[in-house]
Image: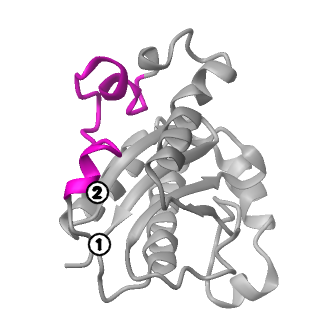
């Protein structure tokens, strides 16, 4: 399901994926992983919880436990993508990727151009799945953590640095601290 199918629940655990435009490896090109971690920090400041994640060179999979807030979940994700996009464009410019930026500018559709959008950094929508059961959360966490292995970026999940796999497999927090899907059961998300 995409962002066009709005998330109507005020809270809950959601598996969310979004992709860089045309599957470009923008996180790798810019070493822009910190843009995602900054978004995670913002989410935590709003009392949301990162349950599992992987930042691949061209896309992100994340399981987030959203607490009830005045903003709709699809708005929170959309705003996160927008601020990450600003950061990635800035990094691309600093690294001298002017031709790529011109190409990304040419991919902006007419409607978005009217709203002063300058570059198409991410695909316009995001995928999401509602995680209603522990079994489904476990399935999604496994999918997230095995992604780098399937892509040939790691031999075992906990080797990939931009993932929560280390915590799930060894009990040691990795680059970004998370709370597992088992730990999230004890948190009231409706507050």
SS state under label 2: strand
- Residue reaching furthest top? 155
- Contact, mark 1 vs mark 2 (Cβ under 8 Å): yes
Q: Nearer the viewer, residue 189 or 29?
A: 189
Q: Residues within 10 Å of mark 1 (few under 14, many from 20)?
A: many
- Distance of mark 1 from mark 2, alpha carbons? 8 Å
In the rendered image, which quarter contains the N terminus? bottom right
Report the magenta residues as a range: 161-186
Q: Which residue is mark 2?
A: 49
Is 180 covered by the magenta stretch? Answer: yes
Question: Where residue 48 sits: x, y (%)?
Answer: 28, 64
Magenta stretch: includes residue 19: no
83 horizontally vs 42: left or right: right
Q: Residue at 40% across / 24% down in the picture?
A: 161
Name the spot of residue 146 as percent of width and height, x first. 57, 26
Q: Which residue is mark 1?
A: 67
The answer to whether residue 126 shows anywhere in this view is yes
């Amino acid at each position: 399901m995409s962002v066009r199918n709005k998330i109507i629940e005020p809270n809950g655990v959601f598996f969310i994926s979004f992709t860089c435009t045309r599957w470009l490896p923008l996180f790798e090109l810019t070493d822009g992983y910190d843009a995602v971690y900054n978004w995670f920090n913002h989410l935590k400041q709003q009392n949301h919880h990162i349950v599992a994640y992987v930042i691949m060179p061209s896309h992100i999979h994340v399981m987030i436990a959203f607490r009830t807030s005045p903003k709709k979940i699809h708005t929170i994700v959309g705003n996160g993508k927008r601020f990450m996009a600003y950061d990635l464009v800035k990094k691309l410019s600093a690294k001298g990727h002017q031709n790529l930026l011109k190409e990304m500018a040419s991919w902006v559709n007419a409607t978005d151009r009217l709203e002063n959008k300058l570059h198409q950094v991410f695909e316009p929508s995001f995928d999401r799945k509602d995680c209603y059961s522990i079994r489904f959360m476990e399935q999604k966490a496994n999918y997230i953590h095995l992604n780098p292995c399937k892509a040939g970026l790691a031999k075992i999940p906990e080797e990939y640095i931009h993932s929560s796999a280390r915590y799930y497999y060894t009990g040691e927090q990795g680059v970004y601290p998370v709370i597992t899907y088992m730990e999230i059961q004890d948190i009231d998300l409706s507050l």
